[in-house]
Image (tube, helix red, strand yellow):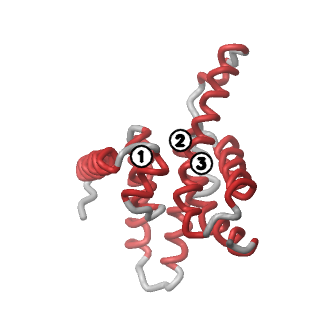
Amino acid sequence: MASEKELSDFLKSVEKRAFKRAVYAVRDEDAALDIVQDAMIKLSENYADRPSSEWPPLFQRILGNATMDWFRRQKVRGALFRNFSDFEPAGEDGDFDILETLEALEGSAGSESAADALSRSQALGLIEAEIGELPARQREAFLLRYWEELDVAETASAMGCSEGSVKTHCSRAVHALAKALKAKGIVP
């Protein structure tokens, strides 16, 4: 059984990536924050007694379910109360950006030139935008595998699909990203 500190440390370690994943899914930072908080509460209430090694896929599954619950509530709310502001496109206010945070941490060594930093910043922005354009399942598989660093089995468990589906979604996401980024002049 894991300690309260281990649970707290785990939740701190996943909060920023989980928030970004939720923002990609719902395109609303306030809703994304609520979704992540709900997922963290559910993990704490229902699975705190589990070994800490089980938390990453459990949390990702809970986060995915909380996101789907949000969409269901939105659909019901939309059917009952037509809110015309829902038809406006979501704005890009960018208060929090994990890629910018990582960029700041990496760039703090001061070893790169301003031109290199600007170039990298622009490339990261393009990559983030292209990730946001991926189909939902591809984006989810990609983020779980490469941002959350879950293995194929853990990702399949979190997504509620087969390992083969995870591999297919990841492959399609990587190819789509590579094609889109190559068209914008970003090559590895």
Residue with the mark numbered 3: 63
State which quarter of the image contains the N terminus.
bottom right
Q: CA distance from mark 3 to mark 1?
A: 14 Å
Q: Residue 156 location in percent, x, y? A: 41, 50
Residue at coordinates 43% horizontally, 66% vertically from top-left?
Answer: 118
Categorize mark 3 by other alpha carbons within 10 Å: few (<14), some (14-19), many (20+). Answer: many
Labelled pair 2, 3 in contact (Cβ < 8 Å) = no
Q: Residue 176 location in percent, x, y? A: 28, 45
Residue with the mark numbered 2: 25
Residue at coordinates 45% horizontally, 61% vertically from top-left?
Answer: 147
Secondary element at image label 3: helix
Residue type at mark 2? Ala
Categorize mark 2 by other alpha carbons within 10 Å: few (<14), some (14-19), many (20+). Answer: many
Query: Left or right: where does residue 46 sit relative to residue 177?
Result: right
Residue at coordinates 60% horizontally, 31% vertically from top-left?
Answer: 71
Residue type at mark 1? Arg
**Mark sitting earlier along the chain (2/3):** 2
**Mark sitting earlier along the chain (3/1):** 3
Q: CA distance from mark 1 to mark 2?
A: 9 Å
Query: Left or right: where does residue 168 sit relative to residue 111?
Result: left
**Mark sitting earlier along the chain (1/2):** 2
Across the whole image, how many numbered discs are drawn on residues?
3
State which quadrant residue 76 falls in.
top right
Residue with the mark numbered 1: 139
Labelled pair 1, 2 in contact (Cβ < 8 Å) = yes
Q: Residue 119 location in percent, x, y? A: 38, 65
Residue at coordinates 56% horizontally, 59% vertically from top-left?
Answer: 17
State which quadrant residue 83 falls in.
top right
